[in-house]
Structures are given as C-alpha cells and as structure tokens.
Image: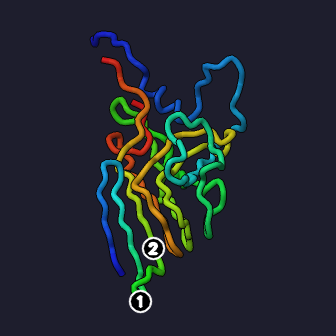
Amino acid sequence: MTANASGVAVSFKKEILEAFHNFGTTNTRGGTGADTFNGALYYQNESIGPATTAYSSPGEVSGTGYTAGGKALTNGTAPTTAGTTAYWTPSAQLQWTSLTISSLFDCCLLYNASQNNRAVCALTFAAQTVSAGTFTITWPANTSITALLQVN
Amino acid sequence: VRDTPEEHDNARILVTEWLFDGEVVRRDAWVNVLRAQVAGVESP
C-alpha cells in the first residue's frame, strides 16, 4: 500500500487549460468549442504585463503588414501532462511578413480571442523595429520543462 | 546582408539587415522565446 498524499491533481492542472472546471457561481464561458488564441505586439513602455486582463488596442503596434489584434496562434497540440506539470505550447511559429514597424516594440500579448479577448500571458524581448521584412516568434520545445505555458 | 545575434535571459534574437549604399532597406527580427510562463508552484 502507498500512503495518501495531499496535492492538486495533475489532471486538474491539465483540465484548467481545457476549461473543464468553473468555480464561479454562474456559467461565464461562451461557446463550446476550442478557443482561438492570438498574439498581439506592443510598443515598448506600454505597461503590458501580468496585470493585463485583456487585449486592448492602445499601445499596440501599427504599420504596414500588421492588423490590429495581431495573429492567431497555431494550436495543433492539446495540453498534456508529465510528472506534476500540465503544459501547452503553440504548435507553430508566429510570423508577420512584409512588415514595417518603425518604432521600437518589445512585447507580445497572448490572449483568448474567443473569450472576450482575455489575457493569457505577456512575453517581452529586447526592443525591435522591422522594416519591409519578417518578424518571427518561435516557441520553446513543448516539454514539461520548457513548454511556453506551464501549470505546476 | 548583416546578421546580428543577441542573447538575453528570456529570448534569443537574430536581426538580419539588408544594406544598399549604406542604408538599411530591409530589417528582419527573429525572436526565439526561451522562458516558460509558469502558473503556480507545487506545495511541498
């Protein structure tokens, strides 16, 4: 026999990423299918971060080749678990081509475009400009150690 | 063409610039995210 142990169920962590659980008193979730997640770019010093609750356009980059709201993430791999970690990573890079952003930008906000644009996470990087070129974000490997989004 | 790699704690960046007569006519940036976004810490 094995001793009992307290702890958050690993399956629950994965199910958080799959929207199985609702601790609220009402059904606040719209829709029944998989959600679409977007990545939007922001100029530097726009206060985007963990306190950001939803996508909004102020501070978002603008320029040739960029549409407000950003681009949809490719979601070809469902959340999974390994050990005590649930994790998920977009399954393809996020890329803009023929892009010109003349002022420095340093942040990509990932948000749920299917659920009132609610924020998932903000990613910062060294500030960049792009001129008539390609801007690409690639993600870490989708493992329990390196995945982009982890619930531990 | 000029490549400029940058190493940061949360991302590796490669900037590629095309120059013509000393002017940058195209600038690409490639951001390789290195840091995971982690929610929660398992209690001991």
The circle on residue B27 is 2
Q: Residue at x 44, y 79 (%)?
A: B24
Instruction: Compute the Cα span from label 2 to label 1.
Output: 15 Å
The residue tagged 1 is B21
User: Mark 1: which amino acid?
Assistant: Asp
> Residue A33 vs residue B11: left or right?
right
Furthest residue in direction bottom, as rendered: B21
Q: Residue at x 68, y 17 (%)?
A: A25
Mark 1 Cα within 10 Å, few/some/many (few <14, many 20+)? few
Image spot of residue A127 (x, y percent): 43, 57
Q: Against A127, is A46 above or below? A: above
Pick the quarter of the image with the C terminus of chain B.
top left
Q: Residue at x 64, y 53 (%)?
A: A69
**Is label 1 in a helix, a strand or a loop?**
loop
Name the chain under label 1: B
Pick the quarter of the image with the N terminus of chain B.
bottom left
